Image (tube, rainbow, N blue to C red):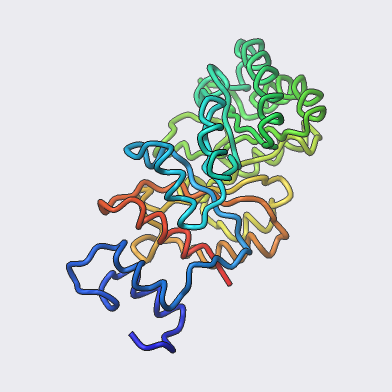
Amino acid sequence: MTPNLNRRKALRNIAAGSAMVPFAASLSQAFAASERVLGAKLNGKINHSVCKWCYSKIPLDTFAQECKKIGLTSIELLGPEEWPVIQKYGLTCALPWGEGLTRSIDKGFNDPKNHEELIKGFEDVIPKVRAAGYDKIICFSGNRRGMSDMDGLRNCAEGIRKLIPTAEKHNVTLVMELLNSKVNHKDYMCDRTEWGAALCEMIGSEKFKLLYDIYHMQIQEGDVVATIKKYHKYIAHYHTGGVPGRHEIDETQELYYPAIMKAIVDTGYKGFVGQEFVPSRGDDLASLKQGVTICDIA
């Protein structure tokens, strides 16, 4: 490989795993070779995070060390008992979660029967989030179960408003995830950006925003870049994932992530982007590094 190989060509070679090393070499070997051209330093326009559940086979302590080597500064979707492990390596948790019902996807704020337990759970964990140095926590709408959009909005707003004083006191933002209800989370209510934005307006606090999951919203509604531009003021966090299949985010799938990252940066967003694809090639850390490289726009 010649020294003047440009970055785009280098990335193509990494994805193919061929031009820089013998055909039989692993993707991680391809990346090792590529660093002579691309260098190890990230560009800094994107703050890189990763969701631990996608790498369940790797112990958290080991995973934290490997993430540090790649250049990630966050591992997310971790609970209070896990935060000290990543803190040992100088990593943050860009989007923590709580315990008990606060982690439930299908039983959320749209059902008033859940409000008492959810409020108690979040009031307990929000101070812990702040004490650990974090400023966000994930939450969910719950499933419809025959409920109308408007009733769901009213019920979610009623429950979440009761938590806003605690969130404001501790400077922690509740972040509701947008999930697709077509493939992965049948009947989930917060499945469209427009609905989530309407809930933000009803609650009327900067301490409640949305997690825009690019994988989920491509499946549910498409038009990703235009949607980000339109609704970015309601979005506090982003997740990646390849469509279809929720695997690697390279040329094997239908989304072009460099353009999506540029759209995010152009909105003025300064938060984290969490890799949330499930590696499928047998070298999970190499796939993670590839995803970070693809999203690390210049």
Task: Mark yes or no: residue 289 visible.
Answer: yes
**Quarter of the figure with residue 21:** bottom left
Viewer-side residue, 182 vs 59:
59
Name the residue rendered at 33%, 62% in the picture: 252
Quarter of the N terminus within the rendering:
bottom left
Q: Where does residue 6 sit, x and y in percent of width and height? A: 45, 83
Q: Where does residue 113 sit, x and y in percent of width and height? A: 61, 10
Would you place residue 21 above or below residue 270 in this image?
A: below
Name the residue rendered at 31%, 68% in the picture: 30
Q: Where does residue 162 sit, x and y in percent of width and height? A: 77, 19
Would you place residue 296 above or below residue 129 in this image?
A: below
Would you place residue 88 above or below residue 227 in this image?
A: above
Would you place residue 271 above or below residue 184 in this image?
A: below
Q: Where does residue 12 sit, x and y in percent of width and height? A: 37, 74
**Quarter of the figure with residue 48:** bottom right
Number of dots carrying numbers: 0
Left or right: 167, with 59 as reference point: right
Name the residue rendered at 19%, 72% in the picture: 23
Residue lying at the far left of the rendered structure: 24
Left or right: 289, with 130 as reference point: left
Name the residue rendered at 71%, 35% in the picture: 173
Quarter of the C terminus within the rendering:
bottom right
